């Protein structure tokens, strides 16, 4: 799958991640909020970041036809975060995930990109049910999920003994 724009929003472009995004991924995955709310992925060098991109998002594109995308500003091209769809072991449904560099928080980028990813998943990929998971104390992400129309369903653990997470799903019709 070649690099290119997957989803275009009003202010954002969502594109396939590629190994050359390693400096951005290294920075993002080591921000304190990422480590606290999402977890330590063990990415400490550019080599680690390239490996994360190849074995994570790029493998997901190949296996499932979707994954996490690089989010950049349409007007400047500045890379601000990641957003996309993830198929996790331990979760029967595909989930929407996002993370943004702290300096780009509180501008609506997470909600804009996550809403576009939900639309893309439903309309283009034909996914029936898309969920989201978040740490119970991640108020920022919870607000984004509620803004894009997802509703708290229950607490779950992805693995036995793992942290308890909030599961959000589409509203019941």
Image: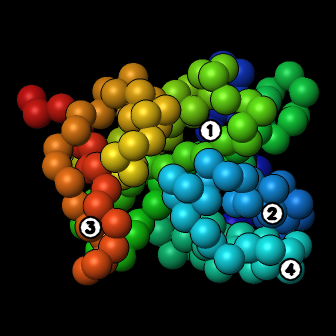
Q: Secondary structure at mark 1?
A: strand
Residue nearer the viewer, 22 or 3: 22
Q: Is residue 155 left or right of residue 62?
A: left
Q: CA distance from mark 2 to mark 4?
A: 9 Å
Tell which residue pokes out farthest to the left in this image. 173
Please identify, in this view, whether the residue under mark 3 or under mark 4 is nearer the observer: 3
Question: Is residue 92 positioned above or below 159 on the image?
Answer: above
Callout 3 touching callout 4 (CB < 8 Å): no
Is residue 157 among the parts visible in the rendering?
A: yes
Can you say which quadrant of the picture contains the N terminus? bottom right
Which residue in the protein does label 1 denote? 7
Residue at image position (39%, 43%) is 137
Count of numbered marks? 4
Which residue in the protein does label 2 denote? 26
Is residue 17 among the parts visible in the rendering?
A: no
Quarter of the image where one finds residue 11: top right
Q: Earlier in the sequence, mark 3 or mark 4?
A: 4
Q: Secondary structure at mark 2?
A: helix
Which residue in the protein does label 4 denote? 47
Residue at image position (67%, 52%) is 32
Q: Earlier in the sequence, mark 3 or mark 2?
A: 2
Q: CA distance from mark 1 to mark 2?
A: 23 Å
Image coords of residue 4 (percent x, y): 76, 50
Q: Earlier in the sequence, mark 4 or mark 1?
A: 1
Q: Secondary structure at mark 4?
A: helix
Please identify, in this view, whether the residue under mark 3 or under mark 1 is nearer the observer: 3
Callout 2 touching callout 4 (CB < 8 Å): no
Which residue in the protein does label 3 denote? 157
Q: Secondary structure at mark 3?
A: loop
Q: Earlier in the sequence, mark 2 or mark 4?
A: 2
Residue nearer the viewer, 93 or 31: 31
Please identify, in this view, whether the residue under mark 1 or under mark 2 is nearer the observer: 2
């Amino acid at each position: 799958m070649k690099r290119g724009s997957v989803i275009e929003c009003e202010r954002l472009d969502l594109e396939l991640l590629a190994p050359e995004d390693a400096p951005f991924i290294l920075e993002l995955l080591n921000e304190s909020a990422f480590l606290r709310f999402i977890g330590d992925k063990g990415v400490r060098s550019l080599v680690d970041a390239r490996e994360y991109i190849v074995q994570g998002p790029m493998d997901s594109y190949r296996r499932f036809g979707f994954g996490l995308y690089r989010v950049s500003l349409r007007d400047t091209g500045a890379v601000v975060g990641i957003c996309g769809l993830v198929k996790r072991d331990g979760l029967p449904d595909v989930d929407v995930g996002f993370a943004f560099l702290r300096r780009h928080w509180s501008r609506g980028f997470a909600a804009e990109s996550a809403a576009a990813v939900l639309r893309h998943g439903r309309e283009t990929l034909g996914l029936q049910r898309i969920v989201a998971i978040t740490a119970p104390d991640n108020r920022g992400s919870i607000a984004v999920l509620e803004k894009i129309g997802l509703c708290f369903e229950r607490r779950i653990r992805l693995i036995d003994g793992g942290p308890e997470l909030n599961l959000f799903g589409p509203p019941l019709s």
